[in-house]
């Protein structure tokens, strides 16, 4: 129930710092603390988006966007509090969470609404255990700046981070082929074989990997991810195998465990496997076959019992023909291949998922959007979605921030979708977007046309003209 991070922001942290930490921790709300780690307030994802939409430079400090009226729960209360009370406390929080603090207002942890509700549903007895878990966590630390990035990475590689959060029910779909795919994935989950997930970026490969792990007999073990494309090649080997004391300049003195070791007893998710260098492919193959390896600079063989799930959008067969990918490794990895169709091939999922994102994101963004205008639904339906569900999520997030309430209209769509919509609907779409913007400006200025014109960046006479045109 307690989210496994132990990081807080400082008021002097910048927009860039906050964005990075939010991205890395996937946290929707972060506590903000002073030099001594005492709670100052909270910084939410909606504040982050506001800063971004206001086009503030990335070095702007978050101070002005910190909400100081954070809902808190004193640590000592946790001993007596019931789930129902906790839920009430969190319900009263505008950001859907409560920060746990000690007697000196030092930040201890975060309780979020979704986690409390989940725990409520799953088990009533879990609370004590969870509380003990946070009481045992290290002291919370300020979010690392760039120079501390390595240490932060080390921390986030601690076992608490090696969790697979998604399950089958998170894979939303109405599509027949997808449903069939889920059935195959569920079958694969029961065995210990390697699974290769294929599909365009943003189609949900990671989601499947999580769900497979969680449905497997290794679910209690770690779920460790390596993104082979984002780790520089010269570091990937150490990332995989770990290293011994003094293995190379800059290496930590005490040595370090690699991801293979960390994944022992669980699942190793190799994302973007097509980007792995050939020499590492050979080493990985040896691990899969012999199940033993050495740390970089090490002499002691290490045994790891892992299940490998890999993912790629690369044309592995072509790469094999060009000798850029090892055929023997390919056969080892794709004992079972699951190809996730792109969103445009399962158009019926677009609105299903979009509406689910609205529900999911309204509380996070503090918006109260009720749906999507019909004409906009058509545009979403006909768009090609090259970035798949990830892009759809971004479009909906952005639209919620712009719309704030009511239904999502054309004015809330990004240009790439509007451009397409203009082709489909001609000039009317631009006009519809313009009308919505004017209506909003008038609402915000309580009907004051001078102020509305200023807000819209147009002259008064142009505004009057448009009001007449739109019958406003
Ligand atoms: N069927 C789905 N229902 C709901 N959400 C989904 C679905 N598929 C994907 N998502 C969401 O879309 C986003 C992208 O999914 P994910 O990261 O799993 O894609 P991916 O294929 O691994 O992308 P990449 O190849 O770029 O790493 C995530 O936020 C995920 O939760």
Image (cartoon, rainbow, N blue to C red):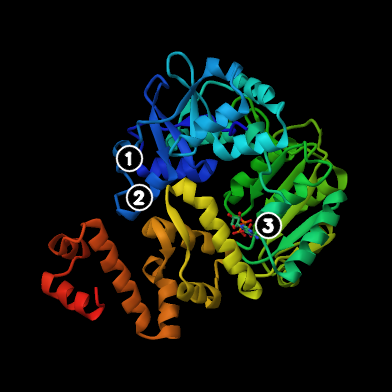
The x, y position of residue 128, in whole percent, is 67, 21
The x, y position of residue 230, in whole percent, is 57, 52
The x, y position of residue 359, in whole percent, is 53, 54
Q: Is residue 307 above or below residue 66?
A: below
Disc ID at residue 171: 3
Q: Is residue 417 above or below residue 232?
A: below
Mark 2 = which residue? 50
Q: Label 3: state its secondary structure.
A: loop
Upstream in sequence: badge 1 or badge 2: 2
- On the question of residue 276 being in view, the answer is no
Q: Residue at x 17, y 78 (%)?
A: 465
Task: Name the quarter where the N terminus is drawn.
Answer: top right
Q: CA distance from mark 3 to mark 2?
A: 29 Å
Q: Residues within 10 Å of mark 3 (few under 14, many from 20)?
A: some
Q: Is residue 106 above or below residue 403?
A: above
Q: Residues within 10 Å of mark 2 (few under 14, many from 20)?
A: some
Cβ atoms under marks 3 and 1 closer than 8 Å: no
Mark 3 Cβ inside 8 Å of ligand 1? yes
**In this rendering, position of residue 272 left or right of residue 85:** right
**In this rendering, position of residue 232 left or right of residue 409:** right
Q: CA distance from mark 1 to mark 2?
A: 9 Å
Q: Residue at x 40, y 38 (%)?
A: 43
The x, y position of residue 49, in whole percent, is 39, 50
Cβ atoms under marks 1 and 2 closer than 8 Å: yes
Quadrant of res 447: bottom left
Q: Residue at x 26, y 68 (%)?
A: 438
Q: Nearer the viewer, residue 96 or 195?
A: 96
Q: Label 2: state its secondary structure.
A: helix
Mark 1 = which residue? 65
Task: Name the quarter where the C terminus is drawn.
Answer: bottom left
Mark 1 Cβ inside 8 Å of ligand 1? no
């Amino acid at each position: 129930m307690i989210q496994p991070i132990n990081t807080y922001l400082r008021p002097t942290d910048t927009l860039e710092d906050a964005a990075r930490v939010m991205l890395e921790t996937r946290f929707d709300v972060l506590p903000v603390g002073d030099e001594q780690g005492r709670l100052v307030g909270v910084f939410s994802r909606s504040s982050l988006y506001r800063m971004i939409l206001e086009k503030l430079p990335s070095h702007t400090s978050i101070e002005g966007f910190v909400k100081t009226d954070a809902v808190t729960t004193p640590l000592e209360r946790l001993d007596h509090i019931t789930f129902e009370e906790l839920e009430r406390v969190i319900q009263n929080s505008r950001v859907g969470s409560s920060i746990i603090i000690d007697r000196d207002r030092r930040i201890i942890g975060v309780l979020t609404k979704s986690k409390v509700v989940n725990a409520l549903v799953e088990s009533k007895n879990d609370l004590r255990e969870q509380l003990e878990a946070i009481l045992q966590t290290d002291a919370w630390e300020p979010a690392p700046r760039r120079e501390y990035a390595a240490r932060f990475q080390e921390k986030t590689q601690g076992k608490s981070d090696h969790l697979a959060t998604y399950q089958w029910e998170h894979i939303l779909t109405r599509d027949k082929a997808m449903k069939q795919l889920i059935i195959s994935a569920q079958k694969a989950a029961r065995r210990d074989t390697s699974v290769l997930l294929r599909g365009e970026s943003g189609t949900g490969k990671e989601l499947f990997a999580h769900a497979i792990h969680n449905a497997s007999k290794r679910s209690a073990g770690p779920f460790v991810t390596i993104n082979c494309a984002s780790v520089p090649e010269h570091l990937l080997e150490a990332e995989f195998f770990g290293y011994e004391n003094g293995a190379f300049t800059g290496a930590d003195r005490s040595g370090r465990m690699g991801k293979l070791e960390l994944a022992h007893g669980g699942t190793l998710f190799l994302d973007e496997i097509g980007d792995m260098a050939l020499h590492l492919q050979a080493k990985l193959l040896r691990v899969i076959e012999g199940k033993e390896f050495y740390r970089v600079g090490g002499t002691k063989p290490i045994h790891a019992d892992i299940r490998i799930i890999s993912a790629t959008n690369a044309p592995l067969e072509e790469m094999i023909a060009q000798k850029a990918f090892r055929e023997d490794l390919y056969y080892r990895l794709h004992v079972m291949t699951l190809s996730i169709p792109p969103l445009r091939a399962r158009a019926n999922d677009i609105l299903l998922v979009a509406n689910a994102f609205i529900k999911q994101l309204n509380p996070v963004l503090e918006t109260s959007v009720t749906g999507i205008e019909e004409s906009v639904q058509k545009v979403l339906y006909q768009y090609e979605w090259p970035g798949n569900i990830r892009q759809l999520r971004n479009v909906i997030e952005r639209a919620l921030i712009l719309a704030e309430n009511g239904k999502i209209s054309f004015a809330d769509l990004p240009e790439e979708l509007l451009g397409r919509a203009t082709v489909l609907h001609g000039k009317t779409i631009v006009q519809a977007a313009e009308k919505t913007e004017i209506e909003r400006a008038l609402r915000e200025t309580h009907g004051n046309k001078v102020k509305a014109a200023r807000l819209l960046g147009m002259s008064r006479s142009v505004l009057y003209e448009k009001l007449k045109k739109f019958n406003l």
